[in-house]
Image: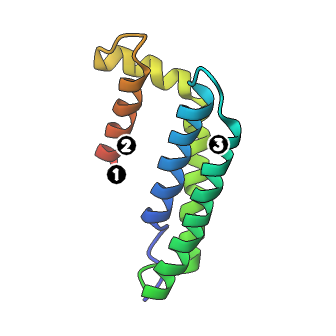
Amino acid sequence: MDFSGPSDNQFFMVFFYSYNIIIYFILYSEKQHKTFAAFLLSVNSFMVVIAALCLNYLGTAFYLQSIIGVVYGVIYTAICLNLDTEIHRISEMTAFINKTSKKYKFYMLFISLVAFT
């Protein structure tokens, strides 16, 4: 068995949960819950480590695959957070969504990510 690519499991655990936590608890919340968000991000980090250990123990992913999946997830999260206004603007133009409904824009982003992966 050789290296087949980054771990998709680790990528989605890092990107999806981190992006949702940051968006819903810090960026687009009326009251920012930074301590709760930090707690959730630390729980997510712990679960990513546990998942990497379990994937290696079961033989479905090497540690290197898990590490590269995590790095890709962090990079993709940073890109999506930096390009957040552009993502919303494009989703407003293409999906016929009102400017005030950010919830539907997030759903549109995740649906498009699932469709392309």
Disc 3 marks which amino acid?
Phe
Q: Which residue is mark 1?
A: 117
Q: Residue, x 47% and y 70% (percent of image)?
A: 5
**Residue 65 can be seen, yes or no:** no
Colour style of the rendered protein structure: rainbow
Mark closest to the chain's N terminus, 2 or 3? 3
| Residue 4 percent across, percent down from the top left | 44, 75
Q: Which residue is mark 2?
A: 113
Q: Residue, x 58% and y 76% (percent of image)?
A: 64
Q: Nearer the viewer, mark 3 or mark 1?
A: 3
Disc 1 marks which amino acid?
Thr
Horizontal side of residue 16 vs 22, given as left or right: left
Q: Nearer the viewer, residue 6 or 43?
A: 43
Horizontal side of residue 37 vs 84, given as left or right: right
Q: Which residue is mark 3?
A: 36
Label 3 environment density (alpha carbons within 10 Å; few <14, some 14–19, many ≥20) = few
Disc 2 marks which amino acid?
Leu
